[in-house]
Image (cartoon, rainbow, N blue to C red):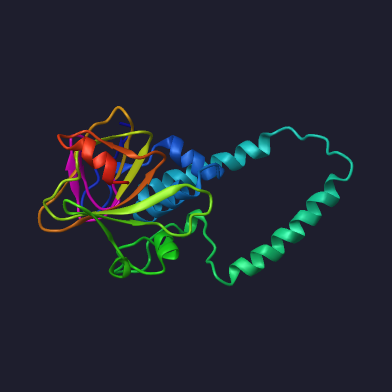
Amino acid sequence: MNVVSAQGLSGPLPQHHLSDDLLAAYAAGSLDEASSLFVASHLTLCPTCRHRASMLDDVGGVLLEDIAPVAMSAGALDAVLNRADGFADSAMNKAANDEPVSLADHRETVSGKDLPAPMRRYYGCDLDGIVWKRQGGGVSVASVPGLRDGSHAFMLKVEAGRAVPQHTHGGNELVMVLKGAYSDAAGRFGRGDVELADGDIDHQPKAEAGEDCICLAVTDAPLRFTGRMGWLLNIFVKM
């Protein structure tokens, strides 16, 4: 389990945070689209990680300033200028539909919204507009639409008081709570909290009573169900 826990935070602020490695990869622009969406969404809810991400962004700028210059090849300037013209045209077209995003923008400013702003841009709605696909056992899913690089993210809804079937992971799984809360062997996870699980983790998260638990999940391999009926679930349930 690779979870960074905050100390001394209370109330609605997240208690389980993104790792330094994940924040550094986000600042460097090296994450896939699903993972970038996950990090951006967490940053809207977590002032602690916004501060850490801003520090990493500043460190990256200093490192770039310290890199020794390298001689350019013949024609490199013209090639760069031509590409810049193309990027400018593309950016102008994209700006008509998308809002610019920077670290300074990663804060939730719209009250009464359950989905962080980066997720609303993908779904085009808030939670009340999501179409869920039932998986059985009180569990429903809704894939994140529009991911263009083949990465995979989905929302998972677990009815209050119900548990996800016991499972482990074929790869890595990032989970962040958007509404409600759940508990497993690693502790309690409420709104904005992040949990990272891998093939060494075999757990059965259970939603708290009183409110359905809704999470954003990013996986790079299917779950492997391990409970008493795991063999059957592995045939029929795909998450």
Q: Which residue appears at 83% of the width and 39% of the height?
A: 72
Q: Is residue 186 magenta?
A: yes
Q: Residue furthest bottom?
A: 96
Q: Is residue 195 above or below residue 82?
A: above
The N terminus is located in which quarter?
Answer: top left
Q: Which residue appears at 75% of the width and 56% of the height?
A: 84
Residue 8: x %, y % from top left: 24, 42
Q: Is residue 201 left or right of residue 103?
A: left
Task: Inspect this view and state whether residue 15 appears.
Answer: no
Q: Residue furthest top?
A: 200
Question: How many tags in the picture?
Answer: 0
Q: Is residue 219 magenta?
A: no
The answer to which of 239 and 184 lies nearer the viewer is 239
The answer to which of 122 and 48 lies nearer the viewer is 122
Q: Is residue 38 left or right of residue 186?
A: right
Residue 18: x %, y % from top left: 37, 41
Q: Residue furthest right?
A: 74
Q: Is residue 32 left or right of residue 62?
A: left
Residue 87: x %, y % from top left: 70, 59
Q: Which residue appears at 50% of the width and 45% of the height?
A: 32
Residue 116: x %, y % from top left: 37, 60
The answer to which of 74 and 57 lies nearer the viewer is 74
Q: Which residue appears at 71% of the width and 65% of the height?
A: 89
Residue range corresponding to the magenta coloring:
177-193
Task: Inspect this view and state whether residue 44 appears.
Answer: yes
Q: Is residue 186 above or below residue 132?
A: above
Q: Is residue 24 above or below residue 84?
A: above
